Image (cartoon, helix red, strand yellow):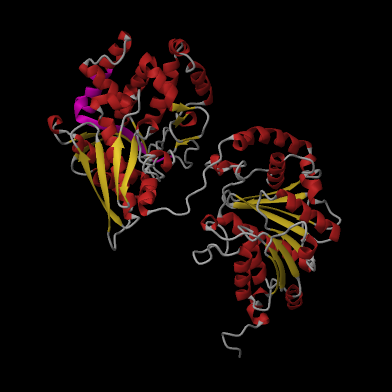
């Protein structure tokens, strides 16, 4: 019996037998596969095919590992950063099979070495980066000239698109039709040829990460590992001459996320009329991605303080204004400057109360994020001015547990759609009550009649907001019509309006005269039905939150701490799988009406605010001065919103003088 330190080929790959015969396994031992590119898919190809028992490889890659490779690339570890990929992957493959015969091309596959790279190869496997089009075309063409089968498998989202090109079959060029096309058109044709059915498009949640100008796109280890699996299966069929291998013009796309397999036969490749039609649509859709400003490279070194700030910037704020800036004092302390954006009327309410509540939500987010970086947090508000500055210090602490709400920081969002109307469970209510703390009083309004009353109040607030000319410019500034994911506003698609209403709203918001005309034609009623009535009735409950502290004793510290508890309440709801939407417009306009404040020059609108104030006291059971927050809550339908407010990059939130 051999010892555990000895390598015996037959023993090492004996578990393949059954799926291969002894004779076939012996044949694989004598085969050679050429792999160009050892990154996201190429490294997985090499290790998978080595475990299949293939005995020889020609491998080519000129790159070295770095942090950006960690999400998907075999061989990317802290120990291999800066090391050549080909060198690392050869070592890993030889650890699987010390008998491997490996020819390594550290300069990558080039036009000068293409024949040497393909010398002796029984199969070529494409592991090149998506954007390496020219060299890919040359290798596939040379494979066709030499009669070498070639396969390509691309990681597409959480799936893989794969094709085989066999001697005397349809060629790579005949399928993709890239010759003579400009670079961006080649990218488009390659992508569309790989994914003619587009199974992945439905769950691409952030299209801004597709950056053709910078030759960068999103990837997942799920897709890369699936590539290795399907390539190994195709390699087995090619090298052993068995099984039904559907080569080009057959195309395969398996998407594990959606649980779907599409097999398409494109007799004319990208030259077919349907592919040509898709190309026309795709050019328009992807044109903006080519022209836009490239996304910045992620940092390669980040301090714990920057990690904390980066996670905490997902704290909520009115209209996604993010009214805070950071001044770094040292490696463990920062000063927060709270400042209402110019013209943001929301922050003038009660002398800046929403700004302090938002500041408190940011503080709680910082505290939660600090626990994930082994730090506790303490803060101090400077002075009695509103809103002022807040000094924050983080203290490294051993054996500190990560707050259970940390994973909810980025997932928490405003969902303006109707929810399921099933009642909140007792354990959900108990968790939310615990999160809100003792300094705040939480009132639930779950009954349908109460929700109808809230819906009527909210609809009246919407009517007031749309009819007040002073709010017009704010709406124009806040609504983002161009982006599904808005870093500094609210995407139009997240407003909860159908396409017809959105189209009318966009037309009307170009000029106040148009808005006034649309209001007169029932535009406010149409909007309120979709943004207030349907969502509020489609909820588990409405709720209000008031401070236990008397009004006269409420200073900045009280409101900042209230904001901290409100953030824990919201994050707890997210962790429980619940959705939430603040309902602050009824509170704000009811207070204006209750106190007779001249918030608008339109007398009819002020009269509506007075009606709202009376309704508010009847529905909520108290005056507006006691209430600091209102909203609705419930279990969302399965799919998360495709449009949502995101956040500005951290670099934009840090004082330029301090630097990031």
| 116 lies above or below 637 | below
Farthest residue to the bottom: give it: 1
Q: List x then y, in percent, for residue 647.
A: 42, 39
Residue 629, magenta (yes or no): yes
* Above or below, 123 relative to 372: below
Magenta highlight range = 612-636
Q: Position of residue 246 (x, y in %)?
A: 77, 55
Q: Is residue 513 left or right of residue 426?
A: right
User: Between residues 51 and 189, which one lies in front from this camera angle?
Assistant: 189
Res 468 seen here: no
Which quarter of the figure is the N terminus placed in? bottom right
Name the one closer to the observer, 418 or 660. 660
Residue 380 image-quadrant placement: top left
Q: Quadrant of residue 28?
A: bottom right
From the top left corner, tell me how far across and down residue 63 is, in percent.
62, 59
Residue occupying image coordinates x 31% and y 54% = 371
Q: Residue at x 25, y 30 (%)?
A: 353
User: Eyeballing the image, is 220 above or below 498?
Assistant: below
- Residue 172, x across and y down, in percent: 78, 50
Whether 615 is among the magenta residues is yes
**Residue, x 36% and y 54% (percent of image)?**
304
Report the number of discs.
Answer: 0
Q: Residue at x 19, y 38 (%)?
A: 557
């Amino acid at each position: 019996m051999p010892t555990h330190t000895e390598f015996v080929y037959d023993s090492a790959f004996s578990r393949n037998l059954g799926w291969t015969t002894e004779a076939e396994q012996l044949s694989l031992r004598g085969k050679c596969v050429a792999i160009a590119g050892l990154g996201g898919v190429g490294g997985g190809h090499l290790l998978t095919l080595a475990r299949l028992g293939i005995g020889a490889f020609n491998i080519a890659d000129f790159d070295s590992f770095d942090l950006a490779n960690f999400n998907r690339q075999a061989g990317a570890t802290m120990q291999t950063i800066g090391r050549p990929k080909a060198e690392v992957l050869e070592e890993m493959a030889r650890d699987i099979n010390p008998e491997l015969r490996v020819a390594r091309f550290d300069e990558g596959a080039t036009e000068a070495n293409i024949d040497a790279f393909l010398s002796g190869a029984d199969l070529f496997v494409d592991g090149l980066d998506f954007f390496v089009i020219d060299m890919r075309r040359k290798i596939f063409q040379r494979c066709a000239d030499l009669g070498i089968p070639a396969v390509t498998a691309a990681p597409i989202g959480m799936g893989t698109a794969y094709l085989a090109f066999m001697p005397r079959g349809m060629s790579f060029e005949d399928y993709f039709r890239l010759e003579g096309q400009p670079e961006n058109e080649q990218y488009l044709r390659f992508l569309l040829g790989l994914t003619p059915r587009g199974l992945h498009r439905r769950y691409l949640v952030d299209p801004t990460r597709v950056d053709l100008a910078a030759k960068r796109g999103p990837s997942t280890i799920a897709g890369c590992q699936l590539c290795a699996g399907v390539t190994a299966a195709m390699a087995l069929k090619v090298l052993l001459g068995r099984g039904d291998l559907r080569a080009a013009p057959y195309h395969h796309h398996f998407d594990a996320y959606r649980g779907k397999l599409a097999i398409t036969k494109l007799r004319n490749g990208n030259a077919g009329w349907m592919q040509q039609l898709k190309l026309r649509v795709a050019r328009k859709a992807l044109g903006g991605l080519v022209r836009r400003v490239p996304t910045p490279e992620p940092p390669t070194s980040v301090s714990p303080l920057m990690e904390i700030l980066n996670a905490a910037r997902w704290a909520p704020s009115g209209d996604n204004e993010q009214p805070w800036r950071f001044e770094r004092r040292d490696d463990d302390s920062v000063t927060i400057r709270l400042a209402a954006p110019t013209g943001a009327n929301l922050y003038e309410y009660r002398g800046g109360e929403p700004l302090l509540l938002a500041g408190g939500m940011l503080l709680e987010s910082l505290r939660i994020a600090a626990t994930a970086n082994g730090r506790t947090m303490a803060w101090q508000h400077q002075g009695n001015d509103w809103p002022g500055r807040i000094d924050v210090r983080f203290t490294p602490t051993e054996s500190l547990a990560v707050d259970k709400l940390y994973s909810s920081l980025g997932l928490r969002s405003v969902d303006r759609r109707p929810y399921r109307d099933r009642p909140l469970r007792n354990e959900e209510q108990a968790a939310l009550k615990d999160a809100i703390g003792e300094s705040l009083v939480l009132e639930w309004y779950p009954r349908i009649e109460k929700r109808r009353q809230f819906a009527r109040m909210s609809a009246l607030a919407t009517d007031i907001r749309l009819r007040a000319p002073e709010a017009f410019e704010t709406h124009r500034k806040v609504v983002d019509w161009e982006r599904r994911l808005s870093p500094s506003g609210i995407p139009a698609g997240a407003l909860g309006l159908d396409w017809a209403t959105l189209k009318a709203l966009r037309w009307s918001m170009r000029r106040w005269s148009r808005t006034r005309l649309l209001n007169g034609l029932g535009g406010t009623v149409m909007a309120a039905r979709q943004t207030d009535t349907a969502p509020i009735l489609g909820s588990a409950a409405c709720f209000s939150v008031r401070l236990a502290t008397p009004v006269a004793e409420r200073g900045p510290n009280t409101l900042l701490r209230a904001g901290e508890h409100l953030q824990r309440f919201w994050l707890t709801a997210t962790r429980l799988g619940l959705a939430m939407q603040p309902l602050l417009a009824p509170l704000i306009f009811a207070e204006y009406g209750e106190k007779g404040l001249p918030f608008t020059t339109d007398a009819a609108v002020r009269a509506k605010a007075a009606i709202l104030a009376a309704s508010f006291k009847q529905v909520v059971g108290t005056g507006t001065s006691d209430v600091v927050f209102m909203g609705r809550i419930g279990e969302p339908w399965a799919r998360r919103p495709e449009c949502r407010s995101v956040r500005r990059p951290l670099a934009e939130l840090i004082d330029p003088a301090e630097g990031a």
